[in-house]
Image (cartoon, rainbow, N blue to C red):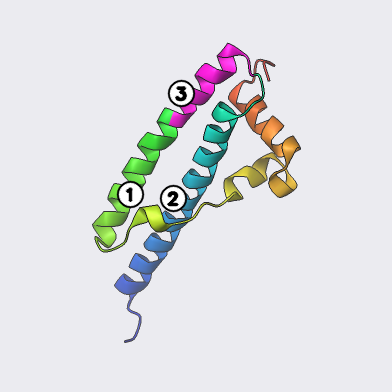
Amino acid sequence: MALTKTRTRTQTALTRLALLIANVHGELALVEKLLAGPEELPDAHLRGLAAKRAELQELRTALYASLHQFDPGLDPADIGSDDGWLKKFGRGGGKTAVGRYLKALYPSGMA
């Protein structure tokens, strides 16, 4: 079947939605890891990370609903996680990038 403009747009939208979901899955995994981690974080960080987790869960729900609009047969939970969102905080997504991510969440120098 030849790709029509409508079909191409739908595929592009699905690809972008899948990438957004993968990024949310990746960021949510990091936030949950930080919340469950053995590191002692200040209460402000814990509250902020809990708020960020809630925000990401809401975003994930909205993205899942959007994906179901395009294709009800797809299971968004099957989409893996991606650390592409962390690239803006540093190469490789290592400790430095995580530190910059925390500083971005707490710009007042609390991180």
Q: Position of residue 47 (x, y in %)?
A: 51, 17
Give me the residue at 36% from left, 54% from top.
Answer: 76
Q: Of helix, strand and loop, which one carries label 3?
A: helix
Single out the residue that lies furthest toward the front.
38
To which quarter of the image does residue 95 belong? top right
> Label 1's element?
helix
Residue that numbered label 2 is attached to:
21
- Mark 2 crowd level (few <14, some 14–19, many ≥20, 10 Å Cα): many
Q: Which residues are magenta?
A: 41-53
Q: Amino acid at mark 2?
A: Ile
Q: Which residue is mark 3?
A: 51
Up-down relation of residue 30 to residue 3 (above or below) = above
Identify residue type, mark 3: Ala
Indicate the quadrant where residue 78 lies. Answer: bottom left
Residue 64, numbered label? 1
Tag count: 3
Chain-order first, disc 1 or disc 3: 3
Q: Is residue 111 above or below residue 54?
A: above
